Image (cartoon, helix red, strand yellow):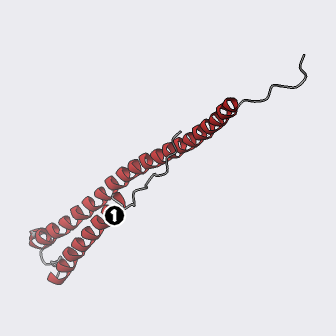
C-alpha cells in the first residue's frame, strides 16, 4: 500500500481551475441578474407613480380651467341679470386679461414640468466587459 496520494496530473489541475473559473463566472452572472431585476422593479414602480401623478395633474389643470371659465361666464351673466340690477359690477378688463394670461402661463409651465418628469433624459447604461469561458 502506498501512503502518499497520487500526484495530480496537469489535466486534473486544469479541470479544477476551469471549475473555479466557471463558479466565479456564475456568481458574477447571478449578481448582475439581481441588479438588473432590481432596476426593472424600480423602473416599473416609477412608471406606475408617473401615471398616477400625471392623472392628478391633469385633473388639477382641468378643474382650474373649469373655474376660470365659470368666472368668465358669471362675469357676463350676473351683471345682466335683472335680479342683481346694479348690485354686481362686471370685472374690469384688466382683471380678465390677468386671469387668462395667468391661466396660460400656469398651463404651459405645468405641461413642461410634467413632460420633464414623465420623460426624463437619462444616459443609457453601457454594459461591457462580459466574461466568456
Whole-percent x, y for residue 44 in the image: 42, 46
Describe residue 10's horizontal placement relative to residue 122 as left or right. Answer: right
Residue at horizontal 21%, vertical 79%? 98
Residue at horizontal 34%, vertical 57%? 118
Describe residue 108's horizontal placement relative to residue 92 as left or right. Answer: right
| Local secondary structure at mark 1 | helix
Residue at horizontal 20%, vertical 80%? 95
Q: Is residue 67 above or below residue 37?
A: below
Q: Can you name the residue that lies furthest to the top here? A: 1
Describe residue 45's horizontal placement relative to residue 2 as left or right. Answer: left
Residue at horizontal 49%, vertical 47%? 130
Whole-percent x, y for residue 102 in the image: 24, 75
Q: Nearer the viewer, residue 2 or 56?
A: 2
Q: Residues within 10 Å of mark 1 (few under 14, many from 20)?
A: few
Residue 82 quadrant: bottom left
Q: Nearer the viewer, residue 65 or 86?
A: 65
Q: Is residue 19 above or below residue 96?
A: above
Q: Is residue 1 above or below residue 119?
A: above
Whole-percent x, y for residue 11 in the image: 66, 30
Q: How many marks?
A: 1
Which residue is under mark 1? 116
Whole-percent x, y for residue 7 in the image: 79, 29
Q: Quadrant of the N terminus?
A: top right
Q: Nearer the viewer, residue 82 or 132?
A: 132
Amino acid at each position: 500500500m502506498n501512503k502518499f496520494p497520487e500526484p495530480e496530473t496537469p489535466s486534473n489541475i486544469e479541470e479544477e481551475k476551469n471549475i473555479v473559473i466557471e463558479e466565479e463566472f456564475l456568481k458574477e452572472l447571478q449578481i448582475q441578474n439581481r441588479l438588473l431585476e432590481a432596476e426593472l422593479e424600480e423602473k416599473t414602480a416609477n412608471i406606475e407613480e408617473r401615471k398616477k401623478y400625471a392623472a392628478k395633474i391633469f385633473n388639477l389643470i382641468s378643474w382650474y380651467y373649469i373655474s376660470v371659465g365659470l368666472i368668465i361666464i358669471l362675469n357676463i351673466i350676473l351683471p345682466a341679470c335683472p335680479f342683481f340690477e346694479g348690485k354686481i359690477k362686471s370685472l374690469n378688463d384688466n382683471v380678465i386679461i390677468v386671469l387668462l394670461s395667468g391661466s396660460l402661463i400656469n398651463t404651459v409651465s405645468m405641461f413642461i414640468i410634467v413632460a420633464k418628469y414623465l420623460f426624463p433624459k437619462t444616459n443609457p447604461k453601457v454594459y461591457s466587459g462580459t466574461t466568456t469561458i
